[in-house]
Image: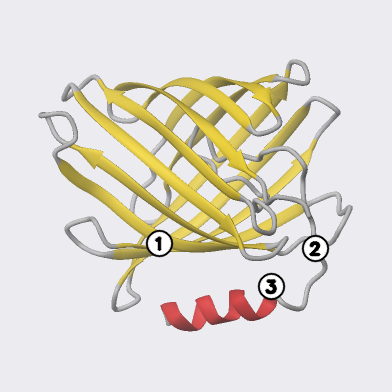
Amino acid sequence: MKNFLLYILIFSATVVNAQFTETLSSDRPGQALSVNTVGKNVFQIQAGIDFFNNNSEFFPNSYFRYGLSEKFELNSGIILSGNKFANDIASFSIGARYNLSEVNSKYASTLQFSHDFGTTIQNSQLTYILGSSLSDKLSYTINLGINFDNDFSFNNGIYVFNLSYVINSKMGVFLEPFGNFLNSFQLNFDSGVYYLLNNNFQIDTLIGYNNSLFVGTGFTWRIPSKKS
């Protein structure tokens, strides 16, 4: 079933109109996945480190995205953990993201599928991403995901509601609740700020609560294809 879903995404990416942004669109900071794909031949690195207060653990994380077309990308992420500063692999995932939106559509939507090899019990996740603007400065992104085992039995549902406000052309802030909603309902939250140094490099920081207080910081580096 996982392969079948991936084949659908790959096929669809070859028949739908393109959509592309000239500045980076990052999943950082926060939990929400961006509704935009990175663009054809664009490679993007999203990296950072989170610290959780309850167990005094650091979680270095990196996420890599590459656009095979304007609307279809492959991505992979790794999260390290351990009280000896990242001596274990908490998560290692490989996935794909496909932009469903038409050009200049008011509402943007995307599908993300990923499989996690790094956890004790391997699992997969299919996420629907919806985004739109409420005004010139205020926008929202919604993630609704299903997490399931290798036998395709459901583990849980995952939700994120990200509300972002653009302060100026380089800086923005966000607030988002997130958690699980099928087997049990969980409400967490975080908030943060990002700063765009240029069209291809962004830094960020955040603070939130997920069973305990956590803080994080990181960067996004977009490497566009060279124009001939």
Q: Are marks 2 and 3 in contact (CB under 8 Å)?
A: no
Q: Are marks 3 and 1 in contact (CB under 8 Å)?
A: no
Q: Secondary structure at mark 3?
A: loop
Residue 5, image x and y in percent?
A: 51, 78
- What's the CA distance linking mark 1 and mark 2? 23 Å
- Three-letter amino acid code of the residue under disc 2: Ala
Q: Which residue is mark 3?
A: 13
- Lateral position of residue 15 relative to residue 135, left or right: left
Q: Is residue 56 above or below residue 14?
A: above
Question: Of all residues shown, which one is farthest toward the right?
Answer: 104
- Three-letter amino acid code of the residue under disc 3: Ala
Residue that appears at 63% across and 52% down:
42
Q: Which residue is mark 1?
A: 94
Res. 29 in view: no
Residue nearest the viewer, comparing 36 with 1: 36
- What's the CA distance linking mark 2 and mark 3? 9 Å
- Three-letter amino acid code of the residue under disc 1: Ile
Q: Earlier in the sequence, mark 1 or mark 2?
A: 2
The count of marks equals: 3
Residue 110, image x and y in percent?
A: 65, 58
Q: Secondary structure at mark 2?
A: loop
Q: Which residue is mark 2?
A: 18
Q: Is residue 22 above or below residue 103?
A: above
Classify the position of the C terminus by image quarter. Answer: bottom right
- Lateral position of residue 189 relative to residue 51, left or right: right
Q: Earlier in the sequence, mark 3 or mark 1?
A: 3
Q: Residues within 10 Å of mark 1 (few under 14, many from 20)?
A: some
Residue that appears at 45% across and 28% down:
189
Q: Is residue 217 above or below residue 46?
A: above
Residue 25, image x and y in percent?
A: 65, 40
- Lateral position of residue 37 relative to residue 2, left or right: right
Q: Secondary structure at mark 1?
A: strand
